[in-house]
Image (spheres, rainbow, N blue to C red):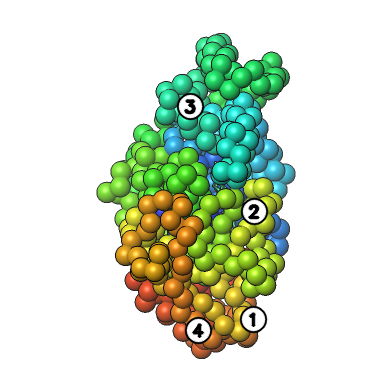
């Protein structure tokens, strides 16, 4: 059963889209506050409520649960129109956000020109483009690191905000050439939504610590995936923040020493959207089978996800980097019907078996995965509620993964709904 600690976090152990949103939705009832720490609207976290699909990009996936507080932490980069759209959609679903949704005054604002620059950079990279979501994530984080970013707190003095905005835009135009941009339209829009946004802005670091002192529990929702982490991922084919445990701490102000429950989300196979190395990728019928059966199309961009076999080398690496304490294996049901299933247990490069994750994307592109093969299962597992309900071969597959990754698998996903979960 779930381990609940005062500060728990959910982190993707592959290249994103592992099914983080679903577990956040399930665990929300056990927590008082749900917080996002990193990334921006590049994330797409799906939950199902009464058969209806809801995708969260910026707002924490716990928002559907009445009475729970949701926080966008200082490490997130926020595109205001996307957030306003999400707020409107939630209101249409009858969700009341008043006094239960806050944004850090230190969170950075993603502006329209960041999105334009994201596109320009991708064009400039030509054949080496990252395949970003074009949500302006890289350019917004670049501004933050270059110490020219604009933060939410600055909206509290709109005149100064406008000056900073114009100076920043001017600087970018000097760097990227005189790209088209309608600053008047964007500033007018931002001014028009100020009354909605200002009440949401808070010193969330202090707020979270005060709530913890009063005995409240916090669940931090990771975004993207550890293989997309700017430091530990498949650089340069990564996102622009620390999608791993370090971002959880820096993006909320909650020190690592307090984050004692680190739940890793692992898909029973592997997917990736965008460019970059993917050793176990299947460019064949099995890959198509997983894509179609698993609905593997991006929640943010709709792009088809690349699909492949489970990769132990990746899982061990990300398990180590994050200090994962327990695993939620997701989408096991998608593998039903495969005659044989393979698990990558290592990599060979130039004929030699590797003992650690290669440093360059070029090397990772060249590695030859070492596989073990097991028998698949044909029985429908969508109604399975406990381990014993699973077919023998599915049980053997899970046991093998647990043995290889060396971290306990505590939950197993068998479908899209919150009820489709086996608790081990
Ligand atoms: P996230 O970004 O990690 O939150 O994942 P996404 O929402 O982008 O993608 C995961 C997809 O898989 C979503 O469509 C989920 O509804 C779906 N999903 C999650 N867990 C399971 C599962 O156990 N079985 C099946 N069939 N689908 C799942
Ligand atoms: P969730 O939270 C899958 C990928 C993009 C691209 C690279 C860089 O839903 O798991 P960016 O726009 O961040 O500069 O793109 O990272 N990427 C994701 N892939 N799921 C995500 O988020 C992702 N966030 C970024 O496809 O390859
Ligand atoms: Mg996603």
**Mark closer to the chain start, 1 or 2:** 2
Name above or below for residue 410 compared with residue 221.
below
Q: Position of residue 260 (x, y in %)?
A: 31, 55
Label 4, label 3: how far apart the Cα atoms are: 48 Å
Q: Earlier in the sequence, mark 3 or mark 2?
A: 3
Q: Which residue occupies 56% across, 16% down?
A: 174
Looking at the picture, tell me which residue is in the foreground, 107 or 178: 178
Q: Does the beta carbon at disc 1 come under 8 Å from ligand 1?
A: no
Name which residue lies at 56% across and 57% down.
272
Image spot of residue 95 (x, y percent): 64, 46
**Pointer 1 local density, CA inside 10 Å: few below 14, some 14–19, many at least 20:** some
User: Can you tell me whether the CB of the residue at mark 2 lies under 8 Å from the nearest atom of ligand 2?
Assistant: yes
Q: Decide which of tag 2 and tag 4 comes sooner along the chain.
A: 2
The first of marks 1 and 3 along the sequence is 3
SS class, disc 2:
loop
Whether residues under marks 2 and 4 lie with C-beta atoms below 8 angstroms apart, the answer is: no
Q: Where does the image place residue 311, in percent across and percent down from the top left?
A: 46, 67
Mark 2 vs mark 4: give the one in front.
Answer: 4
Q: CA distance from mark 2 to mark 4?
A: 29 Å
Compared to residue 157, the image places residue 287 above or below, namely below
Which of the marked residues, 4 or 1, is nearer the chain's N terminus?
A: 1
User: Which quarter of the figure is the C terminus placed in?
Assistant: bottom left
Q: In the image, 330: left or right of 382? A: left
Local crowd at mark 3 within 10 Å, few (<14), some, or many (≥20)?
Answer: some
Q: Read off the residue under disc 2.
A: 298
- Spatial separation of the CA atoms under disc 1 and disc 2: 23 Å
* Image point (34%, 55%), residue name: 321
In this figure, which residue is indicated by the disc labeled 3? 143
State if disc 3 and disc 1 touch (CB < 8 Å). Answer: no
Badge 4 is on which residue? Answer: 374
- On the image, the x and y values in percent for residue 337 come to 64, 81
Q: Is residue 139 visible?
A: yes
């Amino acid at each position: 059963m779930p381990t609940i600690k005062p500060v728990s976090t959910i982190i993707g152990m592959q290249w994103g889209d592992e099914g983080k949103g679903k577990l956040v939705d399930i665990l929300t009832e056990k927590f008082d506050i749900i917080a996002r720490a990193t990334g921006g609207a590049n994330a797409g976290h799906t939950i199902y409520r009464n058969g209806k699909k809801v995708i969260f990009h910026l707002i924490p996936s716990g928002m559907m649960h009445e009475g729970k507080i949701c926080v966008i932490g200082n490490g997130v980069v926020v595109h205001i129109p996307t957030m306003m759209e999400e707020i409107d959609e939630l209101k249409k679903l009858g969700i009341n956000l008043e006094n239960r949704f806050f944004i850090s005054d230190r969170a950075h604002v993603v502006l329209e020109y960041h999105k334009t620059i994201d596109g320009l950079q991708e064009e400039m990279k030509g054949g080496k483009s990252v395949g970003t979501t074009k949500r302006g994530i890289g350019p917004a984080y670049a501004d933050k690191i270059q110490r020219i970013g604009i933060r939410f707190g600055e909206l509290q003095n709109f005149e100064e905000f406008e000056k900073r905005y114009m100076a920043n835009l001017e600087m970018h135009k000097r760097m990227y050439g005189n790209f088209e941009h309608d600053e008047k339209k964007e500033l007018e829009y931002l001014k028009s939504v100020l009354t909605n946004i200002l009440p949401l802005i808070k010193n969330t670091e202090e707020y979270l610590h005060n709530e913890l002192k009063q005995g409240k529990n916090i669940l931090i929702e990771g975004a993207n995936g550890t293989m997309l982490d700017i430091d530990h991922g498949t650089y340069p084919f990564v996102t622009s923040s620390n999608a791993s445990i370090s971002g959880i701490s820096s993006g909320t102000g909650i020190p690592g020493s307090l984050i004692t429950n680190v739940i890793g989300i692992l898909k029973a196979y592997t997917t990736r959207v965008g460019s970059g190395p993917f050793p176990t990728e299947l460019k064949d019928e099995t890959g198509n089978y997983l894509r179609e059966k698993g609905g593997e199309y991006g929640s943010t961009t709709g792009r088809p996800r690349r699909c492949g076999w489970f990769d132990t080398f990746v899982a061990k690496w990300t398990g180590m980097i994050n200090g994962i304490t327990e695993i939620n294996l997701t989408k096991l049901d998608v593998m039903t019907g495969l005659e044989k299933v393979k698990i990558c247990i290592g990599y060979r490069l130039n004929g030699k078996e590797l003992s650690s994750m290669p440093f360059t994307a070029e090397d990772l592109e060249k590695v030859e995965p070492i596989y073990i093969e097991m028998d698949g299962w044909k029985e429908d597992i969508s109604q399975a509620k406990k381990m014993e309900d699973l077919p023998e071969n599915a049980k053997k597959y899970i046991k093998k993964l647990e043995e290889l990754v060396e971290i306990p698998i505590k939950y197993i996903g068998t479908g899209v709904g919150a009820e489709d979960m086996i608790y081990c």
